[in-house]
Image: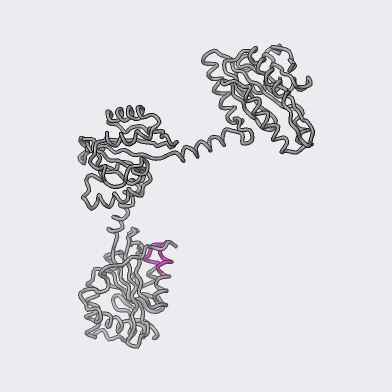
């Protein structure tokens, strides 16, 4: 059950011009009679109550009280110690559409209170009846037409002269207009946090509104700068001072943009590029694209800007600049990208990145009529290392191999770990001779590696299958299959050698070649 916001309801303590003490006295007398009547054989309600049988309707004070209560604008009711509503004035029909008799017929909480607020309402009534301490709250009611309205409620205990609790006086006032105003303010705060379309809202405000919204802007982590049409500073928030190391205070309000630029450029890696960017932005009316400013201390500040239109939509009244330190955001994004496309053990590109690059290279090759080379590499003798010396030793072999072969691979060639002891190399714009030479270098490199475990020297070799696209296959998956089949042929020949895939007519492009 959602607990509605508890707030003070001004003006509900005294109602309809009645003096507080006299009014409470009348309430006490009324509730005492109602409570006494409830213990009888049956209730005989008046127009809007369930009074005790035999109640003196002609009692002048009761008539006066009822007349005063009925003429009020707020909803007022009486609740007995058992939590039952005994009387409600006619204002309930104006606020909810239900007549007093309809409200008194059953459970008024079930009838009037919004479903999600019912439990809270019952709990509060019970707590006030138990503690005798007045309480105030705000909750939603549902009108007869099915509309929700916010009401401010006050639950006031009524006691007799001896201090015994007779029940509660319930007052409910419509606060829907104020709630709607609060919601609009929350929407404004959200818009400020997105740093979109703020200027018109700020420049049309009075000094009081400006101060309030400026305070809100100071909690936004993005630096915000307003410039007028003369390119003078109108406003800058605290985050802007922090991002650019500006001295605190209002010393920059009214200065030209050139003064701010002179302060900012001392932090930049490329001041000229930033100044060119600013000049270009000032020449356009459309919102600028995000621009990343790199600082000497390693920070990256993302900036964007837009013109602030005038209140009537014609012309402009200035420009807003927004600066955000995205250093940590970019660092996390880079880490996530690394985790997504790199093998965590060897830091080589993984299988996912392999397939992306293979498709891209094949597409480029088809476009330009160039060949793409693929080397499928499988280690010989790696499983015995794992079995005899453990997986930690196997990991050490893989890391050492990745480092050594990475030094052999050229800048335009991409080295991947496909999983386990399987690796691959992609070569754009490749020839059969170049791939054969690369396979030789890789075989020699791997065969020359030595590892020591438990005082013993350990070495592995590699079997390599070579495929050339589109000569062997023009589809990525089939090209991988052709290279794998060639690699298994090399392994069957004893390993430590490379083998070319066969052409589509089953003719071999080249024979198996030993690593020597």
Q: Is residue 96 above or below residue 255?
A: below
Judging depth in this view, the residue of 322 and 14 nearest the camera is 322
Judging depth in this view, the residue of 57 and 74 nearest the camera is 74
Q: Quadrant of the C terminus?
A: top right
Tell me residue 172's x, y (percent).
Answer: 30, 68
Q: Is residue 117 magenta?
A: yes
Q: Is residue 391 magenta?
A: no
Q: Report the span colored magenta.
A: 110-121
Q: How is the image coloured?
A: one colour
Instruction: Name the residue at 24% across, 73% down.
Output: 15
Instruction: Name the residue at 33% across, 58% down.
Output: 147
Instruction: Name the residue at 25% across, 69% down.
Output: 11
Q: Is residue 386 above or below residue 94?
A: above
Instruction: Name the residue at 47% across, 37% down.
Output: 330
Tell me residue 313's x, y (percent).
Answer: 22, 38
Residue 478 shows in the view? no
Q: Quadrant of the N terminus?
A: bottom left
Indicate left or right for 423 with 232 as reference: right
Indicate left or right for 368 with 258 as reference: right
Q: Is residue 255 above or below residue 133?
A: above
- Residue 261's quadrant in the figure? top left
Magenta portion: prevailing SS class: helix
Residue 312 shows in the view? yes
Tell me residue 230's x, y (percent).
Answer: 21, 35
């Amino acid at each position: 059950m959602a607990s509605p916001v508890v707030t003070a309801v001004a003006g509900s303590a005294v109602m309809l011009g009645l003096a507080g003490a006299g009014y409470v006295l009348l309430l006490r007398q009324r509730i005492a009679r109602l409570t006494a009547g409830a213990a009888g054989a049956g209730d005989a309600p008046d127009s809007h109550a369930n009074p005790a049988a035999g109640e003196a309707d002609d009692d002048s004070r009761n008539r006066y009280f009822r007349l005063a209560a009925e003429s009020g604008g707020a909803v007022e009711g009486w609740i007995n110690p058992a939590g039952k509503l005994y009387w409600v004035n006619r204002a309930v029909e104006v606020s909810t559409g239900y007549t007093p008799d309809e409200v008194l017929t059953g459970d008024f909480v079930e009838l009037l209170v919004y479903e999600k607020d019912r439990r809270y309402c019952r709990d509060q009534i019970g707590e006030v009846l138990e503690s005798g301490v007045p309480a105030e709250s705000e909750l939603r009611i549902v009108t007869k037409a099915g509309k929700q309205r916010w009401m401010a409620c006050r639950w006031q205990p009524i006691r007799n002269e001896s201090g015994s609790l007779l029940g509660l006086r319930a007052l409910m006032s419509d606060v829907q207009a104020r709630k709607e105003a609060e919601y609009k303010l929350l929407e404004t705060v959200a818009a400020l946090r997105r740093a979109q379309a703020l200027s018109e809202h700020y420049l049309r405000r009075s000094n009081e509104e400006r101060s309030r919204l400026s305070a809100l802007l100071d909690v936004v982590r993005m630096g915000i700068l307003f410039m007028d049409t003369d390119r003078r500073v109108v406003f800058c928030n605290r985050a802007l001072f922090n991002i650019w190391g500006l001295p605190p205070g209002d010393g920059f309000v009214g200065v030209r943009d050139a003064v701010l630029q002179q302060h900012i450029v001392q932090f930049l890696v490329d001041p000229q590029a930033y100044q060119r960017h600013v000049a270009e932005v000032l020449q356009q009316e459309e919102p600028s694209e995000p621009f990343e400013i790199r600082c000497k201390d390693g920070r990256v500040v993302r900036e964007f800007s837009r013109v602030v239109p005038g209140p009537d939509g014609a012309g402009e009244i200035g420009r807003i600049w927004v600066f955000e330190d995205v250093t940590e955001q970019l660092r996390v994004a880079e880490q996530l990208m690394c985790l997504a496309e790199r093998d965590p053990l060897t830091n080589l590109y993984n299988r996912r990145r392999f397939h992306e690059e293979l498709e891209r290279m094949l597409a480029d090759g088809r476009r330009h009529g160039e060949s793409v080379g693929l080397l499928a590499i499988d280690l010989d003798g790696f499983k015995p290392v794992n079995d005899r010396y453990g997986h930690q030793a196997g990991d050490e072999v893989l890391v050492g191999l990745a480092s050594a072969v990475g030094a052999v691979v050229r800048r335009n060639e991409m080295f991947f770990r496909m999983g386990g002891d399987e690796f691959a190399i992609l070569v754009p714009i490749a020839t059969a001779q170049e791939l054969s030479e690369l396979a030789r270098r890789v075989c020699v490199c791997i065969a020359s590696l030595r590892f020591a475990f438990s005082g013993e020297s350990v070495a592995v070799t590699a079997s390599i299958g070579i495929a050339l696209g589109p000569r062997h296959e023009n589809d990525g998956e089939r090209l991988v299959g052709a290279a794998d089949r060639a690699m298994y042929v090399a392994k069957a020949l004893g390993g430590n050698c490379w083998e070319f895939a066969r052409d589509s007519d089953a003719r071999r492009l080249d024979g198996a070649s030993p690593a020597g």
